[in-house]
Amino acid sequence: MDISKLRHVGVMGDGVTATAVRVALPRLGCQEVSLSEAEVIVISPGIPMTDAYAVPVISEVEFAFLWMKTQGTRPELIAVTGTNGKSTVVSLLGHILDCPVAGNIGDPLINFVASDRVCDRLVVELSSFQLEGCSLFRPEVAVLLPITPDHLSRHGTFSNYQAQKAKIFQQQGPEDVVVYDESRPELVSLLATGCQAQKISYFSDEMRLPAQMLGEFNRSNINAAFSVCRYLGVSETVFEERVSHFSPLPHRLEYVTELQGRRVYNDSKATNIDATRQAVLAMTWPTHLILCGEAKGEDYVPLLQEIRPQLSSLVVFGAISMAVKQACDDIGVSVEVVSDITMALSFSLNQSQSGDVILFSPSGASFDQFDGYAHRGECFKSVVMGAA
């Protein structure tokens, strides 16, 4: 597709991504037209892909990449996908490499096309929703983090979800690189389906976990970032020095405060079961877990069976309440069902004692009661600080 010859563009969506595309069109010499008049349609990540139109329907990431290719020189692209850890790895890489981040975190990629946002290197976080609308996107470096079931209500099956993630490397050639964890069978199998890039595993790297980051999953995130940086010529000494000054992202196993002797953590970014599992297993103290949100078609029984030795109490509210209650009943785990975040914190305080942990790690999407995971996390922190 020669994107530079397609001047009439349809835009589907009204959020941040669609707005960025609309703002970019005039500087690209393009005009927004109705979907029926468009030569190409750019779809926002929150809208499922459609084949209802006779013209190409592509994601904003694909649209931006195709325009970057027409600009003569473009930034070196380091693209990161997976189920959990994307934002942390992208932020780590941006911090260590001193370059901008874009995509699912930061600015839409289109903001770096034909603008004053000139850079030599760009780290891009890509969700399955963004990759769903890609077929030509090709980063110089792809980072494939572990893939576990998520967004099944949109993608239908785990295999289809994996297929969207695979689009990050499918256009790469032998001169490109994909970084992955060779201990993960799902990644090994996925890369066997036509990956032409050089493969670099970060499984064998043993970087130290800085004090401000908890959990083996964060060690994996650091190892992934280190493998990328080492490939790009960053020394281990420089890497470790810069990691020591990295601040963990809000709502990702974020320490909030000590409340009545309890350590309180906000992990609102845990929007799927595996993220909650990782958060619970990162705790080394008696843990009182708060779940909430909308389910994504996942089974809660395996999660509860694995983490039950770690749990001192469990409370749930929101749309997943009945699913969690049923799973708990099936395997004999005690759970309290409440109506809101204030009652959940109160229950956890009553069940816990000084030295314990109260962990807010929802495991579900946030849109049943909140505007997003960040809004949910801020509400939790506000309730906690109000009780302090």
Image: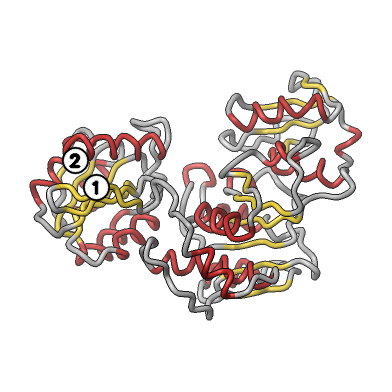
Residue 344's disc is 2
Question: In the displayed structure, would residue 361 be above or below residue 180?
Answer: above
Q: Which mark is residue 387?
A: none
Q: Position of residue 224 (x, y in %)?
A: 56, 67
Quick one: 75 or 362, which is closer to the camera? 75
Give the crowd class for mark 1: few <14, some 14-19, many >=20 residues within 10 Å: many
- Identify the residue at horizontal 26%, vertical 63% (top origin): 307
Could one spot residue 262 in this view of the protein?
yes
Contact check, label 1 and label 2, Cβ < 8 Å: yes
Which quadrant of the figure has residue 62? top right
- For the point 65% across and 70% down, which residue is it? 234
Q: Is residue 68 left or right of residue 222?
A: right
Q: Which amino acid, mark 1?
A: Ile
- The front one of 285 and 199 is 285
Q: Can residue 297 be seen here?
A: no
In the picture of the structure, the residue carrying the numbered disc 1 is 290
Relative horizontal placement of residue 208, taking residue 225 as reference (left or right) = left
Q: Is disc 2 placed on a helix, strand or loop? A: helix
Determine the secondary structure under disc 1: strand
Residue at mark 1 to residue at mark 2: CA–CA distance: 7 Å
Q: Which of the image's four quarters has the N terminus?
A: top right
